[in-house]
């Protein structure tokens, strides 16, 4: 805490800096104030940087049905689209932990592509049709620890993006953001004074449907098909937290 003597010394220093402001810019002055306050408060390293890998198994039933129904006119599908049953990606964030409670904000993204081989008998050529999928999210969550184990929940502001690859360009077919909810089980495998490693199995579901009509139209399936997708996903994240750990 700031003692009276420390407060007096701090303001004396700020007054001196103000009187010599011809040598200092405003940003530098603000920086000095921030640094002095942090040092005087003797703050502990309670904020941890989060880096993780995600392996997920999404349930995109409507999307997979659209892909499997693709049947172009005047052409044949030599190799059909596979399901989007697996996606992987990166997780980044910041965590503030006190005892057995932690609050966290972050960003993550999982992706994959799906392609089909099309044979056109009129010119005896094969063409490849490819769609790129990504599900990225901003998240805010809380965790409760019970020894090496814990449970967590997070509110996800997630974006489902589907692009069709056309040469060196991408044609955006779906690009929507909706809210989702994630439930996690936490297993703290290793913890030291510098780093901790956690395994986090999770289940996630969307709170509102996504409209895949753009994908349906691109597949020539614009009539008589269901285009409202409600993504559900289960998976696991492998997470490292940097910085001093609070117990």
Image (cartoon, helix red, strand yellow):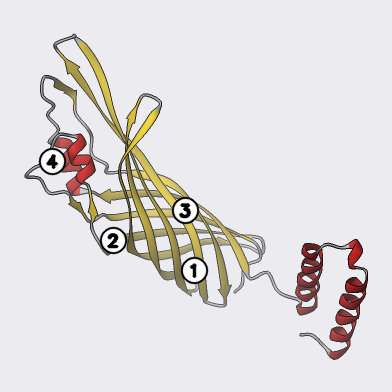
Front residue of this view, candidates 211 and 118: 211
Q: How far apart are the two marked residues, 3 and 4, measured between alpha carbons?
A: 40 Å
Percent across and percent down for residue 244 are 66, 66
- Circle 2 is placed at which residue position? 205
- Which comes sooner in the sequence, label 3 or label 2? 2
Q: How far apart are the two marked residues, 2 and 1, measured between alpha carbons?
A: 26 Å
What residue do we see at 49% from left, 68% from top? 148
Q: Are marks 2 and 4 in contact (CB under 8 Å)?
A: no
Which of the 4 quarters of the picture holds residue 242?
A: bottom right
What residue do we see at 14% from left, 10% from top? 122
Which of the 4 quarters of the picture holds residue 13?
A: bottom right
Q: Are marks 3 and 2 in contact (CB under 8 Å)?
A: no
Q: How far apart are the two marked residues, 3 and 2, measured between alpha carbons?
A: 20 Å
- Circle 4 is placed at which residue position? 222
Q: Is residue 81 above or below residue 189?
A: above
Q: Which mark is residue 148?
A: 1
Direction left: furthest residue: 224
């Amino acid at each position: 805490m700031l003692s009276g003597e420390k407060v007096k010394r701090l303001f004396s220093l700020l007054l001196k800096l103000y009187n010599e402001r011809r040598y200092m810019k405003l940003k530098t002055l603000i920086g000095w104030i921030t640094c002095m306050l942090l040092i005087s408060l003797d703050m502990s390293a309670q904020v941890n940087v989060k880096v993780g890998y995600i392996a997920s198994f999404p349930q995109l039933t409507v999307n997979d049905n659209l892909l499997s129904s693709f049947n172009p006119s005047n052409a044949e599908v030599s190799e059909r689209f596979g399901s989007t049953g697996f996606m992987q990606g990166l997780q980044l964030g910041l965590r503030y932990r006190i005892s057995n409670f932690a609050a966290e904000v972050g960003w993550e993204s999982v992706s994959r592509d799906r392609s089909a081989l099309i044979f056109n008998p009129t010119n005896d050529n094969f063409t490849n049709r490819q769609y790129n999928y990504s599900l990225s999210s901003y998240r805010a969550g809380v965790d409760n620890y019970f020894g090496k184990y814990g449970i967590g929940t997070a509110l996800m502001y997630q974006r489902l993006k589907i692009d069709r690859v056309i040469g060196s360009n991408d044609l955006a077919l779906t690009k929507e953001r909706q809210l989702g909810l994630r439930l996690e089980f936490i297993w703290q495998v290793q913890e030291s004074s510098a780093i901790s490693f956690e395994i986090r199995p999770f289940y996630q579901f969307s709170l509102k449907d996504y409209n895949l009509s753009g994908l349906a139209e691109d597949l020539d399936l614009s009539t008589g098909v269901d285009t409202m997708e409600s993504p559900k996903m289960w998976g696991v994240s492998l997470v490292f937290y940097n910085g001093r750990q609070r117990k």
